[in-house]
Structures are given as structure tokens and as C-alpha cells.
Image: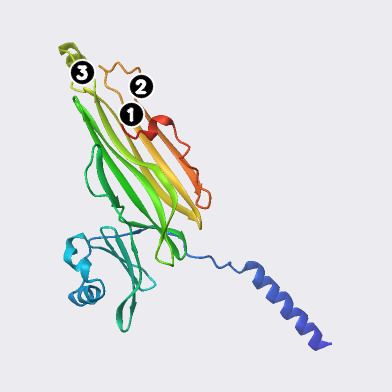
Amino acid sequence: MIKSKIEIAFLVIAGMFACFAKPAFAAPLSILEFKKTQLSQNEQAQLCIQVKKLCEHLDQWRVLKTADRQLWLLSGGDIIQFNDSAKGLKLSKQWHVNLSTQKEGTSDGQFIFPKLFPITQNRYAIAVIDSFSEMYSGGGANIERASFYELTESGNERSFIKNYPFSFNRMIRACFSEQDYESSQGNCHDEDSLSLDIRPVKPLMWQFRYRYNLSVSPASDSGEKSYQGSRNLNIDLNKAPEQPNIPEAWKYAGMG
């Protein structure tokens, strides 16, 4: 009888602890940044033995180190992952993206944005940026569009977001007469810009935070008014929309 009561009391106490115990959560997902970090001579020598061709362009190297003892190297269109163990750095995985680096027409070429975007705790993606520029009388624009690729275990890149607005800055001349210059008090351009900040929300979901700003000159005949806007979009990475749901004016991709 006494033994039975002790067992019941133990079960009650165990149940209370179970109710109040905090559940174990996975570490939050964080975007990792490649930096122009100075590696030690020993680290650099170990990498160069394994990726000799990349040692010809040390000025292009961008590096990041993770808490699980991984070293990632970004150089041009190459992304390489190394395991850091007691025996030193050993090449684990390697990816190569064919980038267009030549200027042609309004295109300024492509580059890999120097950040590693987490899809889940152990799956990552990169962003390939297409950059454009255009010039016109008294103004111009710089435009960036982003396509995202998962770095797969097999060493390939899987595209899952294509040609999203990433950023732009545009300036259009508004003053054409002496009266325009006087009335505008030196503010002789209409200017607008777009920026994007990405935040991982949970595995397989990112939040795209778009910010738009329009500044209209007093001399402008555009009929527009100065304006600031923002939009936060949760993007399901399994079925990302073809384009984000933002106003058309925010999607400016050039006059071509």
C-alpha cells in the first residue's frame, strides 16, 4: 500500500515537471555573411593545396566560419565548403556558378551576393545578382535583380526564385528652365529607390521586406507626390510566386 502511494506521488511530480518544462527549440536561422577576412598563412596554405586555381585570385576571396566548424569560401563564381578538424581543413563540397561578368548594353554583369541564406538548419542558398545601369539626360538608374539557388548536397545549384527586384536607385531630371531652377531651390530631380531586406522566419520560409522611397522635385511635371512605402512578404520557398506582390512602380527593371 505504501509502495503504491509512493509510486502515485512520483508520477504526479513527474507530470508537474513535464507540464512546466520548456520545450527544446532549434536555434534560429541566421543569414551568414562572407567577409574579406585575413586567413592565417597556415589556413591559406591548406586551402591552396586543395583549390590551386583559386589561389591565383586571392583578392577575390571572401570567407565565413560557422559554429559547427565549417569554413566557407566564396571566390567569383565558386563556393567551397571545408571541414575544420584536428587534422586541418579538408574540402567537403564545391559548387560553381557560371556568371556573366561582361558589360553589354545596359547590363553590368552578374555577381554572387556575399551572404549565405539558410533554407533549413543544414540547407543553404545563394543569390546571384544581375546588375544594370542606364544613363539619360541629367539622370540615370542603377538596378539589381536577384535569383536564388539552393546549394545541393550533390554539388549542383537548384533555382527556386528567379529575377526578383533586389534594389534600384533612379534619378530623373525635372528642371529645364531658369524658372524651374528658381522654383525648385536646387532640388531639380525626381528620385526613387527600392531596397530589400531578407529575414528567415522558419525553415522553408523567408520574409522579404521591401522599402520604397519617392522624392519629387517642386519643378516636376510627373504628377506624382513624394512617398515612402514598405511591404513585408512571407515567401514559402517550396512554392515561391513568380514575382513578389509589390506595386508595379517598385519593380522598375530599366527602360530596355
Gap between marks 1 and 2, in whole Å? 8 Å
Looking at this view, is 146 or 41 the one in front? 146
Say if mark 3 contacts mark 2, CB within 8 Å: no
Mark 1 lies on residue? 214
Q: Is residue 161 above or below residue 5?
A: above
Mark 2 lies on residue? 225
Q: Amino acid at mark 3?
A: Cys
Q: Amino acid at mark 1?
A: Leu
Gap between marks 3 and 2, in whole Å? 16 Å
Q: Quadrant of the N terminus?
A: bottom right
Q: Is residue 73 left or right of residue 23?
A: left
Q: How is the image coloured?
A: rainbow
Residue lying at the far top in this picture: please name it.
179
Q: How many marks?
A: 3
Q: Quadrant of residue 95?
A: bottom left
Q: Amino acid at mark 2?
A: Lys
Q: Residue at x 44, y 48 (%)?
A: 161
Secondary structure beneath disc 2? loop
Secondary structure beneath disc 3? loop
Say if mark 1 contacts mark 2, CB within 8 Å: yes
Q: Is residue 166 left or right of residue 39?
A: right
Please state which of the two labelled residues, at mark 3 or mark 2, is closer to the viewer. Answer: 3
Q: Position of residue 121 (x, y in %)?
A: 47, 64
Gap between marks 3 and 1, in whole Å? 17 Å
Secondary structure beneath disc 1? strand
Mark 3 lies on residue? 175
N-term mark: 3 or 1 = 3
